[in-house]
Image: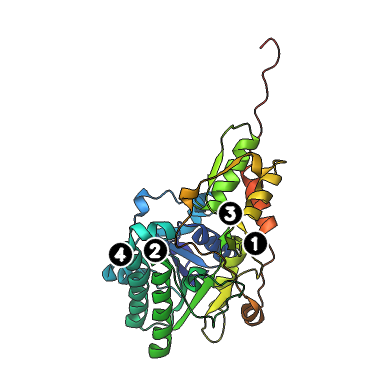
Amino acid sequence: MHALRALENEVTRRALICGISGQDGAYLAQLLLRRGYAVFGTSRDCGNNTFMGLQRLGVKDQVALSSMQTTDFRSVLSVLEEVAPDEIYNLSGQSSVALSFDQPLETFSSITAGTVNLLECIRHLGRPIRFYNAASSEMFGDTGAHKADVHTAFRPMSPYATAKAASFWAVDTYRRAYGLFACSGILFNHESPLRPSRFVTMKVAAAAARIRAGSQEKLTLGNLAIVRDWGWAPEYVEAMWLMLQQDVPGDYVVATGHSCSLEDFVRESFAHFGLDWRDHVHIERKLFRASEIGHSGGDPGETEKKLKWAAQTRMPDVARLMAESLAIQPAKPPRAGS
């Protein structure tokens, strides 16, 4: 916690990233460091966390890390008093939609109770802390042909989405009732090479790279007809930061505005390696989810206008960039006589 004490007189802004070990936390830390912030980060158990994302971006040694459990009020309050942040980015909580069906109470607790604890601590401290909350496009449910904006009604279809919706309204309540500078970013799908393997985009990109390198495996997937708005994570963390630089707090939809199917993503990923995905993918009906969102699309128009931010990278380039990061050189045959 004291690793950045020497920088305190040189840096005017301090940021605390809750849940810094994930994809967004790593890219956000990198962005804030480049902007001259003193960056502090938390995870449930720092001692057992490798913080691979921070390591891959080469910024781990520039971040002061500590353990914090957002569902424990005293834990949160202790860290906030120690760090004295100007900005807090809440990226913590159980992040798997599928797992939320198996662990609904853990999901609700880590997302909803965790968010309320952070808001309560900010209110208790009475400091002008600016707060960002990671909401989710999952809150909208199936948008059909409609592109959801910040005024679109929520129709959550999973415990994860329901918990995110509850945390969204908690932020709204604290902003209105107590005058906190609190924002929710409703981010649609955003990917990068830092995605864990449990995410389908990484599963696809990694399998395509292995097959190109000589693996004889078959990639097993579920419903390829699902449609998502896929963006590039390093761009989306900039939108998070911009939300806290506004004069007035608000909520924003962050998306590319262009949706495509999972089949399109698979096709682009395999095509990058000169492969036809149909030769290497097996569709398993058992992997189809009964409550799967069929179509998800976002309208970032209001965000683009207010934040002067727009996504630059769309799905084909997202797939290409992920594939390039995972490219494995095919094994060379042994030379004659060796």
Name the residue beneath numbered marker 1.
260
216 and 334: which one is in front?
216
Secondary structure beneath label 2 = loop
Q: How crowded is mark 4: few (under 14 residues within 10 Å), some or many (20 or more)?
A: some
Mark 4 and mark 2 lie on one chain; the one further toward the N terminus is 2
Task: Report the residue marked by disc 3.
Answer: 224
For the residues labelled 4 and 3, the Cα–Cα distance comes to 30 Å
Packing grade of label 2 (10 A; few <14, some 14-19, many >=20) is many
The answer to whether marks 2 and 3 mark residues whose Cβ atoms lie closer than 8 Å is no
Quadrant of the frame with the N terminus: bottom left
Left or right: residue 208 compared with residue 173: right
Q: Depth-wise, is mark 4 or mark 2 nearer the camera?
A: 4
Give the side of residue 75 with respect to residue 269, left or right: left
Mark seen at residue 93: 2
Where does the image place residue 208, in percent across and percent down from the top left? 62, 42
Asked if 191 appears above or below 152 in the picture, the reply is above
User: Along the line of sight, which residue is nearer the eye, 40 or 168?
Assistant: 168
Q: Which amino acid does label 4 sit on?
A: Leu
Q: Do the residues labelled 4 and 2 touch (CB within 8 Å)?
A: no
Of labels 1 and 4, the one closer to you: 1
Rendered residue at 42%/75% (across/down): 165
Residue 172's image quarter? bottom left
Residue highlighted by disc 4:
105
Tell us which disc is closer to us: 2 or 3.
Answer: 3
Closest to the observer, 334 or 14:
334
